[in-house]
Structure formats: C-alpha cells, structure tokens
Image (tube, rainbow, N blue to C red):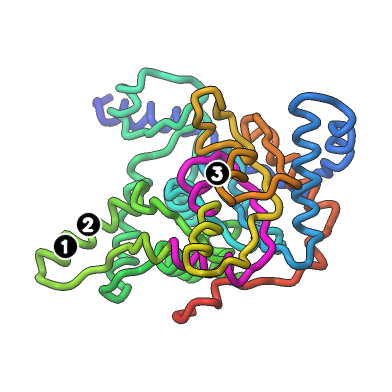
Amino acid sequence: MTDTQINDTRKKELLSKQVEHIDITSFDARPIIDSMGKMSFTSRDLARATGIYNQMLKDKDCTIFLVIAGSTSAGGCMDLYAELVRNNMVDCVVATGASIVDMDFFEGLGHKHYQALEIPDDNTLRSLYIDRIYDTYIDEEQLQDCDHTIGKIADEQPAKGMSSREFIRAMGKYLSEHGKKENSLVKLAYEHDVPIFCPAFVDSSAGFGLVKHQVDRMKEGKPYLMIDAVADFRELTDIKIEAGASGLLMIGGGVPKNFIQDTVVCAEILGHDDVEMHKYAVQITVADVRDGACSSSTLQEAASWGKVQTTEEQMVFAEAGSVMPLLASDAYHRGYWKDREKRRWAKLFAED
C-alpha cells in the first residue's frame, strides 16, 4: 500500500462520525427548565435567562438580536440557530465570520463537521489536511472549497464597498439556488429577510475568498469588491433606531457582543436621544470576570455605558452547547413566537 493510500485510509477513519445537530423540536425542555427554576446556581440562572427570552418573544414591540461567538455551530447547535430563524424567534443576527462562513455556509454547501473519536498529534492532523476545533474535525480540502465559493460569489457582485450584511445576503441567495442543506441559517435568513452582520467578516473563510477575489481583479487591472465595516455599524444602528424596544440573546461575547451593544451609543451620537437601551439581555459564556474582560463586560457593567437595562438581564456562566438546547426547546414549545409579527429588517435597505 502506498503512502497516499495509507493517508487516505487514515483520513477516512478520522472523519467517519459526523456531528449530528440537535433538533429542539424533537423534545420538550419545559419541565426541565421549570424544575431548574426551583434549584440554585447555574440551573436557576438558566431558568431565569429562559424566562427573559420568553419575555422577548411575548413583547409585541421587541426586536430580538441573536448574537453568536464561539464554535457552538460546529459543535451541534447549527440546526438550533436555523430553527430560531425559521420560526420567527429572532429578527437579526450578529456573529463571528467563523460561525456564519466556516460552519453554517460550509455545511450549506454539503460539507460536514466530524466528531473526533480520538485526539491524535496535531501535526499528524495537519499532514492529513484535517483541522481541529477541540474535539471536532473539519476536512481542510472541503473548507478550501468554501473559500473558493466565497471568491466566486464575490466575482459576481458589483465592484464597490459592501457591508457584510449585503454580502451574506448574496451568500444566502447562492445557497437558496445551489445549496445542499435545507436547515442553513444563512439560507433561511435570506429567505425570511433576517439580516446577518459579521463585524469581523474577513476573520474567517470569507477572508481567503475575498483576498483571492481582490488579487485576481488587481492582476486584471479591474476594480474589486470591498467589505465596508463602517457600513455594518451604520446599518445595524439603523435597525436599532427603527426597532425601538430590543432584546439580546448572546452566545459568547467578543466583537459581536460589543458591536450590537454599541448601537445604542451610536444612535445617541447621531442625535437620536430617544433610542432606549436594550431592554432585555441574556449572555451565555464561560469567560471569567476577574481580569476585567468577561469577553467584553458583564451585562451589569454594560449598563454604565448606557447600552443595556439591568431590569431584565441574566448572565449564565456555562458552556453554551450544553444549555442552549434547553433554552431554545423551552421557548419553541411555549410557542410565544407563533403570535409575533415578522420584522423583515433586511427590507430596510435599498438593494433589498
């Protein structure tokens, strides 16, 4: 057997068990959340956070922002987030580029994430073109297909500055026409007019595809597409100004968390003194508060900046993949989303 055959066999062994994304419609978490509300520690925090999310869904005037950082999409929550969009349980998404491109769009193209049945030497993984996220694997060759697809989509866009929202909408259109997975957040967001923002968009597979697009166009002496980060901030602030009451369901922290919270301050800078702070806020994180970080700040700390009200807010210090299925299943089965008006915030922008 040749070295190539040995490597192919070993790679096939390592990529043999696909990650199966949890289906929040298949089980009813309401009794568990009700019981947790009678407990203490993180259990009670989660029950209160779930209650606040249900309040967002019941509030007829509330626009709900889903904010995602970290790798929960790769780890099994991808269909969960898609279900929230499908059932009108969120109105806008702010996320890392990895969550949207490397994970959701990647699977929308027909690729998969895999459970690591063992953790071999990472140099061995590199030799086999396998990327590792803790105990989850990605085939690097498939990921490069994602990179090149992003480049192809960029080639078809007008040579101008585009917000990440506008480009991700083009990605959703591509999946709607050519995708291989029905339950894709990017695809469903396009179909339901739910805008997606990635404030650090090029810090993902999108970055490789967009760089290739620009380099190829430069070689040809042609103009090229650019991602306009300022437009991202302006557009998201426009939504906050129009929305009025708002709630935040935040997984992780970092740039997406800061970005959505800062819209209140930006609106004030633009002269909209009547724009209220985010009325509801839930953050699920494992970040520590002792170093002054907590992946951007606690929700209580954000109140001092005029970003978040402290009446209906809850921090949940837990690994999101272990608690989001309970929160989302509870909210799905309580059914307050059935009476919500669709916001369709994507229609706020001219090209839509």
Compared across the picture, whether 135 is left or right of 200 comes to right
Kind of residue sitting beneath label 1: Asp
Compared across the picture, whether 18 is left or right of 12 comes to right
SS at badge 2: helix
Image quadrant containing the N terminus: top left
Q: Position of residue 48 (x, y in %)?
A: 79, 39
If you read the primary sequence from the N terminus, does the residue marked by circle 3 or circle 2 appear first? Answer: 3
- Residue at point 56%, 39% (across, down): 252
251 w.r.t. 159: above or below: above
Compared across the picture, whether 115 is left or right of 79 comes to left
Which numbered disc covers residue 234?
A: none
Kind of residue sitting beneath label 3: Ser
Q: Which residue is mark 1?
A: 216
User: Can residue 20 be seen from the camera position used here?
Assistant: no
Give the CA distance from mark 2 to mark 1: 6 Å
Q: Are marks 2 and 1 in contact (CB under 8 Å)?
A: yes
Kind of residue sitting beneath label 2: Lys
Which numbered disc covers residue 212?
A: 2
SS at badge 3: helix
First to last magenta residue range? 233-260
Q: Position of residue 213 (x, y in %)?
A: 23, 62
Q: Position of residue 96 (x, y in %)?
A: 46, 48
Compared across the picture, whether 334 is left or right of 14 comes to right
